Image (cartoon, coloured by chain):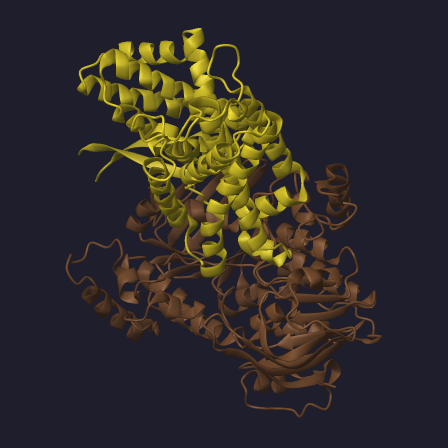
Amino acid sequence: MPNPSEPHLAVAMYGIVKRFPGVLANDHISFEVRAGEIHALLGENGAGKTTLMNILYGIYQPDEGVIYVKGKRATIRSPRDAIRLGIGMVHQQYRLVSTHTVAENVVLGLPVSFLFPERAARRWLEEFSQKYGLSVDPNARIWQLSAGEQQRVEIIKALCRGADILILDEPTSMLTPGEIDELLGIIRRMAAEGHTIIFITHKLDEVFAISERVTVLRQGKVVATLETAQTDKTSLARLMVGRDVIFQLEKKPAQPGEVVLRVEALHVLDDRRLPAVRGVSLTVSAGEILGIAGVAGNGQRELVEALVGLRKSQRGRVFLKGQEVTNQPPRTLIEQGVCYIPGERAMGLAPGLSVAENLILKDYCQEPFARGAFLDYAVINAHANRLVDQYSVTTPSPATPVKLLSGGNIQRVILARETCQSPTLLIAAYPTSGLDVGATEYIRQLILQQRDQGTAVLLVSEDLEEILQLSDRIAVMFEGEIMGILPAHQADLGTIGMMMAGAQRIPMSEAA
Amino acid sequence: MNNWPHFRLEKRLTVPPWLEFLTLAVSLLLALVAIAVLFRVLGVNPIVAYQRIFRGAFGSLYGLTETIVKAIPLMMCGIGLSLAFRARVYNIGAEGQLLVGAICATGLALSRPGWPSWALRPAMFLVGFIGGALWALIPALLKVRFRVDETLSSLMMVYIASELVNYLVYGPWKGAKEMGFPYTDKFSPSAQLPRLLNTRIHYPTLILALVLAVLAYVLIQRTKWGFEIRVTGENPEAARYAGMNYFKTVLLVMLLSGGMAGLAGVGEVAGIHYRLRYPQGISPGYGFTAIIVTWLARLNPLLVIISALLLGGLLVGGDAIQVALGLPVATIYIFNGVILLFVLGSDLFTHYKIRLEWRRER
């Protein structure tokens, strides 16, 4: 039996059990974090990482188990209790008031002077900026900030409340590669100052980049707690998934057929009506994957939305199998076999409707699901049962509301719907973002399989590894323009990196 | 060391049906308790007051038939609103749409008194439906074209409709034989709806409402358009993504809910009053009460039938205590408001687990 009252343990949780309807989210978990260490909490989606940390932060009550904080037995009934114990948490979705300034968000709920509370915030912001490199403009409004800057505000909020134990829930999932490096630097400096960091992640690289120790969760249980230096990627992956993971996909050479998608000098505006896509031209052929690499926010989203009919283009033309489809509504494009896996998963789902209904979200008005004006639920349910089986969606039943499924299973529902009818053109935007190793592997294989069946695939991703692994040709997008298109076998990380930063441009001979 | 109560909220992932029913029942009960305090303040014994209300609404054959009479327009409006609210389109202007339906039916009844009843009565329902639908079309178009919030615009349209009725009954349509009252002339017999025996139940409207409730249920649960309505209400982004036409769905639910409120107006002028009267004479706020009816029924058109009878009974019972106990008319509006407040508030208890804890302050 470990000794929980040892003061060198910042947090000790023993025998934690948490049940949700139909799920055992935490199954007798014991978890120890030493004071001043960076401890990674690794596991697939649905392994129970966030649940465990929500218990530590007082959002959930454990059904069983005890918690010690800094050597003392603690009952944490609410985040307020947690804050009082010096625990801070930065959630995956930031909890900021987007129309207020940084300073106002930082002091919100703090007992500082009633008039001009931002003054106190300014002092803190300066201090943290010097100490940890957490620099943000106190007068900026939250909506004007990038995801990385918003995250810094969240960290500052936790520090102002006196947190010396900081829980970061998948902190890199919304960040660009540059922002990730900055964040890791900040974390190291905080740890050096004596803060204890719990870093929730499902990315193996991050575990090795930042943590001293790592605890692996699988299906609600602790599988192992290890010194990071004494393990390696393959064994961690095996612990996390419960079987061997192939990091190199098997990929047959592409057999490109006729040109399916042709985009000519397309111009698209963003939500603020500023030019986001500036003269993009490209082609995608049947049976090949064109990867679009680039840091998010360089016009990828607007390009994709214009191609699926959700956004009007200003100039330029789009052809599908030689037929012009510029600015056609989504319905027309869907009927021509354009399928779309959206970057924001929530966009592709009606959360309160059942799995079965979400599986026909696009085909509800076509035979055999609809007969005249009526929906044929016998056919719809049979269809759902088949897809749930074929795509291994873990759900209590096809009648379960889709919002009750885990992230990976929700993505499977979308994939099943978008790929089950062998689309002509599949547009996948960030298809594996936020997903664990097992789900990612499955989804990448599925995309390759679609290609081999003759589908033209346009893949947009920030994950360079994914782009290199899957694409047959790679286009790099920077500030709304294509910096060049390379065959995958000629692409190396250095060139692509330079192009992503806008430092290099390749003439467009390959594009035609 | 002092102890103080402390509430904790935990979101429920699934809501069992019995719990939904229980919270609804308890919230209604608590609403009655709250109103009991009000009766007390007004110097009336609440138990006596509730007895009078219950007996007035359900205790006699007359009361029961009057409850049904008042439930008819509530049902009509409520069924339409359940469609709109499902799509998260908040049509608050059923009262105005009801009045415009009444105006249109009156216009036809007064200008074509000689038409045979088999043609005139259905035609009145038809023009009433169209009138109510067109009245709802204005906020619908403002919403889809200019992103004007339909809650406000549909509410504003109520006042316009109300003043329109006033203008007509005091002005051009003022009856020659009505001794100066703000009424139109009485409809010809062929424009009057038949009633059940010697009650005021105009059964053609009642039957129409029951049929429409079933149709609305089938529409929502079993048709393509119902699917579009449900997806739009769940997530408008997903509806667009799936190639659904958001404008079409908004227009559809606004036209249907407006049209059904219009039918309610036809029922009132053709089945109860046989003439157009000043606005409060046609409807004591049926279109607004129908909002409560719809929420009580959890946006289910079939349950609207039951909740309409409940609220109809309350209106009749309200009349009874007004007469018997000398309470002001406003009492019953307060009654309605308190019930809506408690029913909406009860959602918190269905969607969250709540624990009361005694926290020890250090």
Q: Nearer the viewer, residue A36 or B161?
A: B161
Q: Viewed as shown, does residue B269 lie left or right of B162? A: right
The answer to which image quadrant residue B125 occupies is top right
Residue drawn at x 47%, y 77% as measured from the top left:
A274
Residue drawn at x 43%, y 25% as measured from the top left:
B186
Looking at the rendered structure, the number of numbered marks drawn on it comes to 0
Q: Nearer the viewer, residue A14 or B276?
A: B276
The answer to which image quadrant residue A459 occupies is bottom right
Q: Is residue A43 visible?
A: no
Direction bottom: furthest residue: A507
Residue B310: horizontal and vertical position, in percent?
44, 21
Residue B281: horizontal and vertical position, in percent?
35, 28
Residue B266: horizontal and vertical position, in percent?
49, 31
Chain coloured yellow in this rendering = B
Chain coloured brown in this rendering = A
- Look at the picture and state if B146 lies above or below A220: below
Q: Viewed as shown, does residue A82 lie left or right of A207? A: left
Residue drawn at x 51%, y 73% as measured from the top left:
A270
Direction top: furthest residue: B60
Q: Nearer the viewer, residue A227 or B317?
A: B317
Q: Viewed as shown, does residue A408 lie left or right of B349? A: right
- Look at the picture and state if A288 lies above or below B5: below
Q: Is residue A203 visible?
A: yes
The answer to which image quadrant residue A281 occupies is bottom right
Residue B155: horizontal and vertical position, in percent?
37, 44
Image quadrant occupied by the C terminus of chain A: bottom right
Residue drawn at x 45%, y 43% as measured from the top left:
B91
